[in-house]
Amino acid sequence: MIRYHIGKTGVLRLAAGVLAVLLLSSSPGKAQDEAKERIVNSIGMEFVRIEAGTFMMGSPEDEPYRSDSEVLHEAVVEKPFYMQTTPVTLSQWRDVMGKRWLFRRRGDPDAPIVRVSWHDAVSFVRELSSREAGTYRLPAETDWEYAARAGTQTPYPWGKEIDCSRALYANNPMRVDDCVAYVESVGLEPGEPAPVGSYDPNPWGLYDMHGNVWEW
């Protein structure tokens, strides 16, 4: 799913490997707008303000499924930013990039956009910046992990373990199907991404930070 420095930036998230940041004007006349907890742009993309802060980035050595690159260290987010509350949807992508760009791809307009490259994501945020107030960018890795952790210390915002009711994963009937029965029980499609916001948000009001689709 997509996702800024406050007074300067805001972040939006693009699904399937893409996230973005929105930079807001720092002129005095914009000061009140920049202090808002939530911002909605002209095509309905909603952003939530993430305050600056310090957190432990990475994973402890005994955490399951940890990679060697996830060295635990203190990281600082120096400025507030706004992150989109959901991944970028098919509808939002079409509004910015046009239907022809997607080669007539069909699907639920509220589904996260998928099968887009990093270069596609950069094109999206550039185009969005040309037509919206402020400037959008892709978030740094630190932005994303800080927002995903949402002030918590556990592997997931809700605790140490993931389960089928918390996020969309293991939803492949042909391979890893642990959650297929649950997905069907709540009216979602096996083997397909869920519409954004189908699962509960994290403590900072961000949806699908775990599960559903990969993000850049």
Image: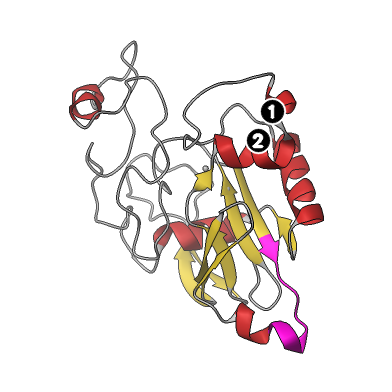
In the displayed structure, 156 sits above or below 88; it is below
Residue in the image at 37% along x and 39% along y? 65
Q: Is residue 23 magenta?
A: yes
Crowd class of label 1 (few under 14; some 14 to 19; many from 20; radius 10 Å): some
Residue in the image at 74% along x and 27% along y? 101
- Closer to the camera, 144 or 154? 144
Q: Secondary structure at mark 2?
A: helix
Disc with the residue nearer the chain's start (2 vs 1): 2
Q: Is residue 51 magenta?
A: no
Residue type beneath disc 1: Lys
64 lies left or right of 1: left
Residue 56 position in % (x across, y down) = 45, 66
105 lies left or right of 162: right
- Closer to the camera, 92 or 115? 92
Crowd class of label 2 (few under 14; some 14 to 19; many from 20; radius 10 Å): some
Residue pushed farthest right? 130
Q: Secondary structure at mark 1?
A: helix
Q: Which residue is mark 2?
A: 94
In the displayed structure, 19 sits above or below 108; it is below
Residue type beneath disc 2: Arg
210 lies left or right of 160: right
Residue 155 position in % (x across, y down) = 33, 53
Q: Look at the image and tell me whether residue 25 can be seen.
A: yes
Residue pushed farthest bottom? 28
Residue 6 position in % (x across, y down) = 63, 75
On the rendered image, what quadrant is the C terminus found in? top right
Residue in the image at 46% along x and 70% along y? 55
Disc 2 and disc 1 in contact, CB within 8 angstroms: yes
Magenta residue span: 22-30
Q: Which residue is mark 1?
A: 99
